[in-house]
Image (cartoon, rainbow, N blue to C red):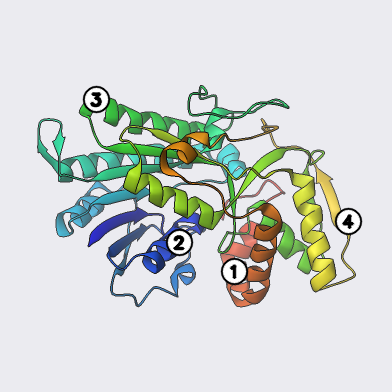
Amino acid sequence: MKTYLVTGGAGFIGSNFVIYMLNKYDDVKIINVDKLTYAGNLENLKSVENNPRYSFVQADICDREAISKIFAENDIDYVVNFAAESHVDRSITNPEIFVKTNVEGTVNMLQCAKVAWTIGDDQYKEGVKYLQVSTDEVYGSLGETGYFMETTPLDPHSPYSSSKAAADFFVKAFGDTYKFPINITRCSNNYGPFQFPEKLIPLIMNNTLQHKDLPVYGDGMQIRDWLYVEDHCKAIDMVIRGGRLGEVYNVGGHNEKPNIFIVKSIIEYIKENVDETVGEHMIKHVTDRKGHDRRYGIDPQKIKDELGWYPETCFEVGIKKTLKWYLDNKEWFENVTSGAYQKYYDNMYSGKQEL
């Protein structure tokens, strides 16, 4: 039985990973640590909450005492650090929060794991690994051609991506300085079930269903590489089990689409399946985000060659699966966008982003 300490496991990608692993393996135990900020939702994990191989601890990854206690009371084999503040708009308004969670929290997790796993000078318990879940945004912005590779210099442009780049450097430093067993994965834009509606796809879907304006930054031609969340979970699993220690692996979906295409695809789906009165007249172009990167594109050749990973879900299939999931789980959506969540959601594009 391998024990995984998953941080941020009540968030979008983290909860999908927890469910994926418990469904795939019978010899896996997962301890989910989440602070339960606005984007953490235990409803995401209802399907596994009674699984005897799953447990939840509410704690902040910056809390040395709490994290050390988890390591002391459990024989942890792997740490998968999803926990992060991830919304770029929020980072522009409140960058300090991102430094606290994404940088200080990562260093605290590294330190606690290092202490727990050390058996000698630069020697650690056999088979352990710390995996940092990062983002393609640390690379900056691409022109019309080319792709991000693991060797691409980091050039973050937002407080969010800067905090993630700083965290990556600390993870790498622990590997280089202490010979600590680490991997870093850098993924493209994820989409799928349980995504908090500050992100483009659930935001546009919810607004479309409610006949609200559909806010699109600038001309909407910012290009992102879209990755279905289950494909990302599969990649993380493969890197934990087979990734070479100290290596970075890029994880991309080969699904580059402009934001305006995503918006129009959602409108079309809702129009055909739910409400024929919606349309592109609902699109409202708003002032572009400060420092908005124009294009992201990942070259995932390394993870394909070394581990045999590939994205199984093309965008045309994944977007329909995602939108259908939201329609089939309206109660979840309503719960997430109620109360304090609704206040945050409604103010996203008015510059009042704090809860």
| Separation (CA) of disc 4 from disc 1 | 29 Å
- Please name the residue that numbered disc 3 is placed on: 177
* Circles 3 and 1 in contact, beta carbons < 8 Å: no
Asked if the residue under mark 1 is in contact with the one under mark 4, i.e. CB atoms within 8 Å, the reply is: no
Numbered badge on residue 15: 2
| Quadrant of the snapshot with the N terminus | bottom left
Report helix, strand or loop for mark 2. Answer: helix
Q: Nearer the viewer, residue 212 or 327?
A: 327
- Residue 39, given in percent of the width and then of the height, sits at 51, 58
Residue 140 percent across, percent down from the top left: 59, 28
Can the viewer see residue 159?
no
Q: Quadrant of the C terminus?
A: bottom right
On screen, residue 10 versus residue 255, left or right, reads: left
Label 2, label 1: how far apart the Cα atoms are: 22 Å
Image vertical order of residue 270 relative to residue 187, above or below: below
Query: Which mark's residue is nearer the viewer, 4 or 1?
Result: 4
